[in-house]
Image (cartoon, helix red, strand yellow):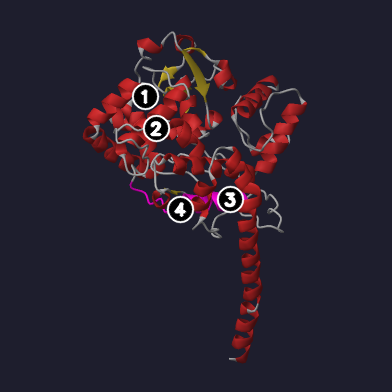
Amino acid sequence: MLSLIAAAFITLTPLPALAASKADTEAQFRQWLQTDLWPQAQKSGISEKSFKAAFADVKLNWDLPDLVPPGTKPPSERKQSQAEFSSPGAYFSEQRLQGLAATGRSLAKENAATLARIEKAYGVPGPIILAIWGRESGFGRAKIPHPIMDVLATKAFMSTRGDLFTRELIAALHILDSGDVREADMKGSWAGAMGQPQFLPTSFLKYAVDFDGDGRRDIWKSTPDTLASIANYLAKKGWQRGRDWGFEVNIPQNVSCAQEGPDLAKPIAQWASSGITRVSGKAFPSGEAKADGMMLVPAGRHGPEFIVTPNFYVIKEYNNSDLYALFIGNLADRIASGGGAFKGQFGDVGKMLRSDVLKMQKTLEGQGYDIGKADGLAGYKTRRSLGAWQAKNGLAPTCYPQENLIGKL
């Protein structure tokens, strides 16, 4: 019993020091609001009255990730597997996609008139809009619990990306000034994205629209405003009216996978003439034949293969991830026409550490290849450079980092 009491005492004694540290940090936060944030907010056009009202009840959220309180250092980077590709197959959970597609088809009927008006105004198909709505917030049904001012203020004051969140925090002040939403209703995620379409405040100011005509841009409670705001975002990012997002294809072995990327576009008819066919067995739509398409092999030869249109890269503007854009495209196809899973299966990829991929990138870079950013992530420039290196050295191009290539490189 004595040892248990002693252990409890040892465990508990540091807490007052921790509490004092938090109290000191809270005091520094209040000082930061006045000396650092207020001058920036004032310069951007925020009044002192609005500033004081907005921060009257704001408090630090100590439960958020990536916090670096004053006097501490960011955690050192640890070896990790590739974030996006560690398990790409699992990303496309069939159960989840089927559930979202069923709900999406139901909501497509329920909101048919609104979606028709939105497509006429912005040129973005309803299934694409619904797919993003479903992916981001479960069609508005997901819990989005965090007071956004608490999140943004905490991250602006003590996170690894303080400058970014300071900009977003000032943008949030302008949203409150606009009268579009009350601060109590301005809820978001732990990362600072708001409402049903998960817009950061700067995106809200640029792309949110009042589509239901009530005088407010309400992405928290209004379905028409939410759907139209997603469409406006995509339209402003360059959505090409009347075009698809892309097609799953079979790429013959004699066609190099090292032709991937948005900067190597060709007319889709030219891709088809090289022997690339749709897995569905259908021809490419006649309206797409003369338009540009791009090869996409997110797992090299170890996964599904695609010819995508520029609209695929517009979807990536929403979330800069090939897998995200493929998820949205696949879900939209399911909503529109009852499509199913991709035919190609992701192989056993993504097991390499980022540090190993980084070494491969630097080796390729040293040999004159353009691998994009040397960051340990196998983006399209890294994939195609690896495929080109493999072909040059008498290996069958796979266009994806593999453990057995490290020594050969």
Q: Does the CB distance between marks 1 and 2 fall below 8 Å? A: yes
Along the viewing direction, whichever of 284 and 22 lies nearer the viewer: 22
Q: Amino acid at mark 3?
A: Lys
In the rendered structure, the answer to whether residue 261 lies left or right of residue 342 reads: right
Q: Nearer the viewer, mark 1 or mark 4?
A: 4
Q: Amino acid at mark 1?
A: Val
Q: Which residue is mark 2?
A: 230
First in sequence: mark 1 vs mark 3: 1
Q: Which residue is mark 4?
A: 147
Q: CA distance from mark 4 to mark 2?
A: 22 Å
Q: Which residue is mark 3?
A: 155
Q: Which residue is mark 1?
A: 124
In magenta segment, residue 142: yes
First in sequence: mark 3 vs mark 4: 4
Q: Amino acid at mark 4?
A: Pro
- The disc placed on residue 342 is none
**Magenta extent:** 141-158
